[in-house]
Every structure is written in structure tokens, then in C-alpha cells.
């Protein structure tokens, strides 16, 4: 079985024609052959203008050379003058001759390859050629005079693609051509993907996976459509099931109806993200805040002495005293400053008295226009036994993970005993990696290597806002300020602006996500339930790539 780069399952490729060809190549060709899918490059045309090019597949075979394959799906034929596509008995001319396109791509890419070889001669010592695949039809009849039949990989040829590939190589081989030695193979690899062994095109793979995940999240919108006429609901969902996106969508839909709406969460960085996600047009009709922020704001505006009621460092201040202060503030609040609708995200972290106090924020507590709570009991970091208002009724379930790749979702579900459910078409992704370090210092050193491999332009090519490092909060005084040339920040704003890679505690990052996450973990304390919830929350933040570095000591 041949190797496919990026390391995708052929079934994950979106384009139907390319998916069929990839499956035939991977399953029928020997394992010495490396297949690069969707290779992009920049070159110049004869006028010197920079042009972007793409080749559907590049095959690197040490025994035979390099082959470029362009894929054209659908029903096509050559009518004696040009290539045309048949659609509903109508013929449409192709914008580009597929063979000329494949040949031009071959020459452009081989110019990149030649730069890696000594300039003793203009000729390369191995064979290279091109072909066009027509996976949905059989090509027969008249062909352009410049095209040999063996350069066609139609539906029949795909049945025995190994033999077809051999014929293509033979048609381009010259007497002086030979197999590639190890150094030449490496030179070709470096031309195609510099340092390709370090996840060759991480940015591209993530881009492809992200498109599939986005479609899956859109499916969750159907739940809101079902509940459109229901004024109260509790919605329980696993990590990555789209709770926050749905909460935001529900809040916006409610505000658009003219109802003054409050979207409430627990975590301050999540609040900041939500604020950035909504358009300015909502003005005062949609207010987004944390419970802490709302309580502080309303107590200040009504002159309720919140901060004089007790010591904010004591647990009882926020669990008992703050709810009482909020109710006092709401008693003094004009009706126009109260809310018709309240949507709560991260409901598992709300204390019992918080729910009681929220009743007073409604304009009409006995006739709430909308009251929705989204929660996941497995993510309760602050409340030992979370409960919800009884008036919300039995919860609706969101059991399907739409944030993470299949492998990350399965990994996280196993931590808390969830039955892992993903939708058909979800990207498989890479296996989460768990590595070990002797000390915290060694762990951050290893994290630095990983971050550089992800972010350096000639390696992973990810933007800094796509990557986050998470560590226990009590280790903050030992966090590095940078990983050599990659700056780190604790500021979520700097991170979102792509100025630095984020380093944050697990709890601060709750409710957020990143394409690639590296987690530093210290030894657990007797595997207690709260510690396991922390790990579940932290690891489930990774959408596409997850690395866990476990230390032997803090």
C-alpha cells in the first residue's frame, strides 16, 4: 500500500474524482511509492508574472521516477477539436486542456526539483512524466495528435492502476534514466515539501478538516430550528458538540426579534470571544457578559456595595454573597435595563444561588420570553454537583462531537466514559500524541520544539493564533516567555491578533478552542474526579492536533 501525504484516509478527500483516484493509487501501488495530494506552487509565466499552480497528485517512485496526475471528473470526451464535458445532454467546453495543464504543471514543478540537483547538466538522471485521470468515464475514439493513449487513466485503467502507471513511466523513459538513489529521493521530497516528515502541510490538512467540521456544526443548527417555538430549554452536550455556537445563534435570533437578550457564560476569555463574534448592529439589544461581570456591573450602576460584603478571595463570596447582591441590584434596576431573554452557556459551572438570582434579571420572571441553558456535566470545574432550574424540564441531548477530529473526540470521550459519537464525513485526523518528560523544564522544552515545528513557515506553516499551550495554573511562575523565535503571551487579545502563541491555564481556556494544542500535565492527585474533568476540558479544546506532555514531577 502506497503512502499518501498529507496522512489522510482517501475517503476524507472531498472531491469525488480525486477520492476515487486516491483510493486506487493507495490501495494498488507498492509501499515504496509516496503520493502527494493537492500540491500547490508558485511559478512565473513567460511574461514574468507570478502564477499559482496546483497538481492533483504527484507520485514519487524511487525505482521509476516522478509522475504528475491531473484528475478530471464527470463525463468528458474529445470532439476532434477540444475537450468537452457532457452535462444533461449539453456539451460545455473545458477552460483548459487537461493534458496541457498536467504537462505545464510537470515542467513548473520539475524546475523546483532541478534546483536541488547539481548543475552539471540540464537533464535529470531519472524519469518524470504526466498523465490525466478520468475516473468517471472510459475514453475511446479520436484523441489529440499530441496525446498517447497510455497517458490516460480512465475508469478501466484504474482497475489495474499499477500496470497503467508502469506503461506511463515506460513512455517517458530514456536510455540514460535510472532509479533514484537515497540522496536524490530526499532532494525531490525537499522540493515538494521542505522537511515533509514534520507533518508536510499541516496548514492545508487543517484547512481541509476545518471545512468538514464547519459543515457538521451547521447540522446542529437543526436543533434550534426544532426548538424555535419553545421558550425554555436545557441542552446538554458533550465537549465539541457546538453548544457555544448554538447559544450564540439562539441569542442573536432572539435579539433580532426585538427581545432584549442576555448571553451569559462563566469564563472571561469566552465572553471576549463571543463579543468579537457578533456584529455591532445589535447595540444594547444583545448583552454578553460573565456572571461575575454582570453582578459587578449592575451593583456599580445601582450603588449596591458588592465588594464591601465580604472577602472576594473566599469561596462563599461568589457562591452566596454575590447572588444576594445581584438580587438587591435588580430590585433597584429600571425595567428597561432588565431582559426579556436569558441564554446561559457553561451552565455546569453556575452555583445554585446563581440560578435563583437570575430570576430577578428578567423583566417578567413569571413569563420569561426565552430561557435557555447549555451545559456539559462532565466539564464541571467549579461546582461539585451542578444543578439547573427545574422549570427548564428534561434536557435535550447533543451527543455528537462536531469540533474535534474523530481520533481526538474518541480520546476525550474515553477520559470521562462518554460514548463517542461523530457524524459521517468527520475527518479522521491524527492520533493524539502523549509523550513524557522528567521535569516541568523538560516539558516546556519539548513543547517549544512542537510549537516551532507547527509555526515555522518552512515546517508546519500554522499561524500563531492557531496554536495554544495549556498548563496547570499553579505552574504560571515557571512559564517561558518565548520558544526561541516564537513569542508567547498570556493575552488572549495578542493571540487573536496573531502576534504570539498563547500560553494559558486549562481553566482560563475553558470554552475556547484552537487548531493545535500542546498540553503540559503534572502528576495527578489520586486520579480524583475533578482532575479528570480538568484533563477532559483541556484536551477537548484541540480541534485538529493534540499533544500531551506528561511530567514525572512539577
Image (cartoon, rainbow, N blue to C red):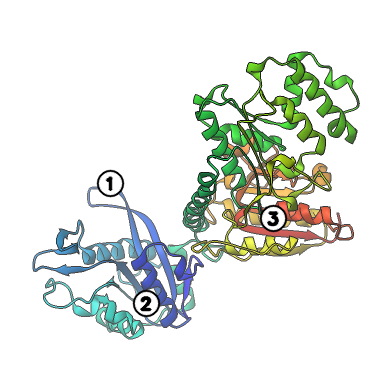
Front-lying residue, 137 or 226: 226
Residue at 73% across, 30% down: 358
Front-lying residue, 181 or 456: 456
Residue at 60% across, 57% down: 401
Looking at the rendered image, the disc whose residue lies closer to the viewer, 2 or 3, is 3
Residue at 76% across, 25% down: 295
Name the residue that disc number 3 marks.
539
The 10 Å Cα crowd at callout 2, few under 14, some 14 to 19, many 20 or more, is many
Quote the CA–CA distance across marks 1 and 2: 30 Å
Location of residue 343 (image quadrant): top right
Q: Position of residue 247 (x, y in %)?
A: 60, 40
Name the residue that disc number 1 marks.
49
Going from N to C along the chain, the mark reached first, 1 or 2, is 1
Asked if marks 1 and 2 touch (Cβ < 8 Å), the reply is: no
Furthest-left residue in this view: 80
Asked if marks 2 and 3 touch (Cβ < 8 Å), the reply is: no
Q: Is residue 282 left or right of residue 374?
A: left
Going from N to C along the chain, the mark reached first, 3 or 1, is 1
Q: Is residue 296 above or below residue 373?
A: above
Quote the CA–CA distance across marks 3 and 1: 46 Å
Q: Position of residue 540 (x, y in %)?
A: 67, 54
Name the residue that disc number 2 marks.
65
Furthest-front residue in this view: 366
Location of residue 404 (image quadrant): bottom right
Quote the CA–CA distance across marks 2 and 3: 42 Å
Amino acid at each position: 500500500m502506497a503512502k499518501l501525504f498529507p496522512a489522510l484516509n482517501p475517503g476524507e478527500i472531498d472531491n469525488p474524482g480525486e477520492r476515487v483516484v486516491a483510493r486506487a493509487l493507495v490501495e494498488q501501488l507498492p509501499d515504496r511509492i509516496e503520493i502527494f495530494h493537492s500540491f500547490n506552487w508558485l511559478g512565473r509565466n513567460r511574461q514574468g508574472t507570478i502564477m499559482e499552480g496546483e497538481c492533483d497528485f504527484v507520485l514519487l517512485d524511487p525505482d521509476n521516477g516522478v509522475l504528475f496526475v491531473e484528475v478530471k471528473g464527470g463525463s468528458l470526451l474529445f470532439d476532434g477539436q477540444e475537450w468537452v464535458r457532457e452535462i444533461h445532454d449539453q456539451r460545455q467546453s473545458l477552460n483548459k486542456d487537461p493534458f496541457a495543464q498536467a504537462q505545464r504543471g510537470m515542467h513548473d514543478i520539475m524546475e523546483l526539483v532541478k534546483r536541488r540537483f547539481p548543475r552539471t547538466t540540464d537533464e535529470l538522471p531519472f524519469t518524470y512524466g504526466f498523465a490525466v485521470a478520468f475516473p468517471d468515464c472510459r475514453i475511446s475514439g479520436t484523441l489529440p495528435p499530441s496525446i498517447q493513449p497510455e497517458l490516460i487513466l480512465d475508469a478501466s485503467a484504474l482497475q489495474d492502476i499499477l500496470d497503467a502507471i508502469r506503461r506511463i513511466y515506460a513512455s517517458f523513459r530514456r536510455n540514460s534514466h535510472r532509479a533514484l538513489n537515497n540522496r536524490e529521493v530526499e532532494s525531490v521530497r525537499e522540493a515538494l515539501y521542505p522537511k515533509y516528515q514534520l507533518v508536510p502541510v499541516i496548514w492545508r490538512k487543517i484547512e481541509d478538516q476545518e471545512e468538514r467540521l464547519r459543515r457538521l456544526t451547521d447540522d446542529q443548527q437543526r436543533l434550534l430550528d426544532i426548538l424555535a417555538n419553545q421558550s425554555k430549554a436545557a441542552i446538554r452536550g458533550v465537549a465539541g458538540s457546538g453548544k457555544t455556537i448554538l447559544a450564540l445563534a439562539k441569542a442573536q435570533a432572539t435579539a433580532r426579534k426585538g427581545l432584549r437578550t442576555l448571553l451569559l457564560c462563566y469564563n472571561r476569555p469566552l465572553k471576549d470571544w463571543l463579543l468579537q463574534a457578533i456584529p455591532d448592529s445589535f447595540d444594547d439589544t444583545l448583552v454578553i457578559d460573565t456572571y461575575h461581570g454582570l453582578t459587578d456591573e449592575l451593583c456599580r450602576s445601582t450603588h449596591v456595595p458588592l465588594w464591601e460584603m465580604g472577602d472576594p478571595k473566599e469561596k462563599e463570596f461568589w457562591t452566596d454573597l454575590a447572588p444576594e447582591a445581584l438580587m438587591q441590584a435588580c430590585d433597584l434596576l429600571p425595567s428597561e435595563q432588565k431582559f426579556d431573554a436569558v441564554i446561559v452557556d457553561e451552565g455546569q459551572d453556575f452555583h445554585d444561588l446563581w440560578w435563583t438570582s437570575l430570576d430577578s434579571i428578567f423583566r417578567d420572571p413569571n413569563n420569561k420570553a426565552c430561557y435557555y441553558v447549555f451545559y456539559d456535566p462532565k466539564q464541571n470545574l467549579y461546582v461539585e454537583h451542578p444543578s439547573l432550574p427545574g422549570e427548564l424540564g428534561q434536557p435535550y441531548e447533543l451527543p455528537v462531537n462536531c469540533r474535534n477530529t474523530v481520533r481526538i473526540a474518541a480520546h476525550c470521550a474515553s477520559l470521562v466514559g462518554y460514548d463517542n459519537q461523530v457524524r459521517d464525513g468527520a475527518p479522521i485526523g491524527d492520533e493524539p500524541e502523549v509523550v513524557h518528560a522528567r521535569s516541568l523544564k523538560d516539558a516546556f522544552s519539548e513543547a517549544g520544539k512542537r510549537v516551532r515545528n507547527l509555526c515555522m513557515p518552512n515546517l508546519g506553516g500554522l499561524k500563531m493564533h492557531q496554536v495554544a499551550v495549556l498548563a496547570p495554573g499553579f505552574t504560571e511562575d515557571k512559564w517561558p516567555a518565548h520558544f526561541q523565535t516564537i513569542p508567547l503571551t498570556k493575552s488572549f487579545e495578542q493571540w487573536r491578533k496573531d502576534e504570539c502563541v498563547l500560553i494559558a491555564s486549562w481553566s482560563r481556556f475553558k470554552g475556547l478552542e484552537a487548531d493545535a494544542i500542546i498540553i503540559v500535565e503534572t502528576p495527578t492527585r489520586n486520579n480524583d474526579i475533578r482532575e479528570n474533568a480538568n484533563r477532559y476540558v483541556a484536551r477537548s479544546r484541540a480541534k485538529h492536533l493534540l499533544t500531551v506532555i506528561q511530567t514525572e514531577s512539577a
